[in-house]
Amino acid sequence: MEKSRKGPIIFSTIKPFAGLKESLKIGRSEVLDQVRNSNIRGRGGAGFPTGVKWNLTATATDNKKYVICNADEGEPGTFKDRVLLGEYAKLVFEGMVICAFAVGADEGILYLRGEYISFLPELDKTLNQMRKDNLLGENILSKKGFNFDIKIRLGVGAYVCGEETSLIESLEGHRGEPRNKPPFPTNTGFNGHPTVINNVETFAAIAHVVLKGATWFKSFGTDKSSGSKLISVSGDCRKPGVYEIPFGTTLKKVLKMVDAKDTKAVQVGGASGTCVSKKDFKRMIAFEDLSTGGSIIIFNQKRNLLDVAENFLNFFAEESCGQCTPCREGIPVLIEKLKKIKNIKATKGDIEDIFSLAETMQLASKCGLGQTASDALISILNSFKKEYTLAKS
Amino acid sequence: MDKLCSVPKTITDGKTNVTICDAKRSQLIPVLRKIQEKEGYISNRKMQEVAFSLGIHPVEVYSVVTFYSFLTIEKKGKHIIRISNCITADMAGAKKIIKTFEKELGIKLGETTKDKKISLEETSCIGMCDQSPAALIDGKLVGKLTPQKVKNIVKELKK
Ligand SMILES: Cc1cc2nc3c(=O)[nH]c(=O)nc-3n(C[C@H](O)[C@H](O)[C@H](O)COP(=O)(O)O)c2cc1C
Ligand code: SF4
Ligand code: FES
């Protein structure tokens, strides 16, 4: 599809595979340096420095290494990876090939969520063309000894499989239950081999980083968050969609961009994110402020935020892998208490219980799902006190 | 049945024989996906066959099947409608859409028509948040659903 999208980095123009050619020219260690110096951090949500991750895998000793692209996009309100895979697949694959070259991997896997199966024929076509053009396969672009190919694996309907160790479990043919970390995938990943796992958007930025340089990349964004972020905007606004914004953009500006009126609240980061009230619309999208994988859901004055919190909690109850107690047992209790609040039956004690349970879940859950499942509810209880009334005990 | 094991090998320590398989455990989910696609579910028999060819216990296969929402042990319809129950769908009037589906199909959410032709299910966010309410219909993403659109879809699927 021809693209008419505009943006500072990913949506800026670039010649297909020019980043890969440049990489082969400058060599492994220079690619690793550029990625590290650009200060790019993972775009999937957690924000781990990509350069550090690649270095760990590059320096791990093993004759088998993997590069995995995490396209399990399942956070409610996120659809930027859908757009990238539909319109910028070559750029994403190019990022994976560059990564393979830098870390010394010979096998790549695109872990595509089952919901996106309709993209499969087109993606396969792109990969086949790349094989024909010697952009995949053996001695890529005549670089002797650089062999790499990418296959696609489909998910089978589990949000938690977006968590990197759970994704690996699922690739290995097991239930998608997150592992303890350490060990980290960078040295003990797929089938026990060193593995780089990055988000679709992270890979899509790489060719730009290598070709245009770390300094150029850092000229966008803030000191602590270099570059840009793709945001997926939905909910109460006239122009929902995917936008590329430099880090440091305020919510106020985003709301204007998408023509949102009468906004009461903005959920930043999806079901596992936080609900922001009007007085905080001057806050910005950045790792040091409102950190997000890109989900922005807008609620106008008519929306009931307790309903929103309940929808999110039901989502987590459905998607929890059930492996650890705080998450498995905690979420239903939060739902019970929230129902009590909605029926004006909750007392001050119930609210205290919610806060203390949420803290336990944050501290004692094994993976990000349980650790963040209570965040939306807590932020709504904190920032939107007018939304609920307590019972007179 | 997809042959998992092309060259099964038997190893023995003199007392017991164990058959090991060259197929990798990592093929388990792709194989189960194919079975689900072809047969609409994964029967006990299939679970045992798959387990045997991978050299693992059937209960392991069962535990994987029951973990993933797109793998099922009950037979689903030939067509599957998965409607998103996410927040943006809710805000965009998904309840009315679900009601229309239920009425047109004569079944409730979570059920399959008697002729085993169509299943109506709900699912989490399907990445169509900008086009809610949306559904995943036989693997195709369909957005901006209206009652009229639903009627047309059902008519088409019933053919
Ligand atoms: C419950 C859960 C779901 C996740 N889902 C995704 C996902 O869909 N896509 C993704 O890239 N990362 C997801 N992550 C984050 C991954 O574990 C991992 O940090 C990420 O893929 C690393 O890539 P990055 O550094 O490029 O962001 C999820 C994490 C958790 C805890
Ligand atoms: S926090 Fe929840 S989803 Fe994560 S491992 Fe524990 S039970 Fe599973
Ligand atoms: S939040 Fe509804 S499809 Fe994503």
Image: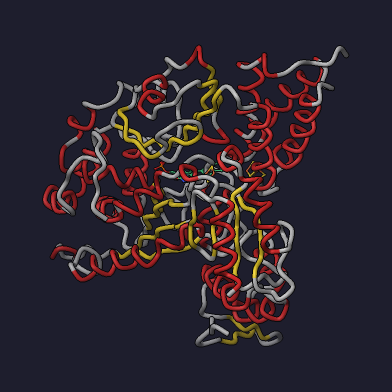
Residue A179 position in % (x across, y down)? 58, 48
Task: Name above or below for residue B69 compared with residue A165.
Answer: below
Q: Is residue B8 left or right of residue A231?
A: right
Q: Is residue A295 left or right of residue A384?
A: left
Asked which quadrant contains residue A379, the reply is top right
Asked which quadrant contains residue A232, the reply is top left
The C terminus of chain A, quarter of image: top right
Residue B147 visible in this rendered orientation of the protein: yes
Residue A191 position in % (x across, y down)? 48, 61
Residue A210 position in % (x across, y down)? 19, 42
Q: Is residue B49 left or right of residue A205?
A: right
Closer to the camera, B39 or A128? Answer: B39
Give ligand 2's quarter of the image.
top right
Residue A78 position in % (x across, y down)? 47, 41
Closer to the camera, A309 or B29? Answer: A309
Name the residue at 25% across, 52% down. Answer: A98
Name the residue at 14% across, 50% down. Answer: A15
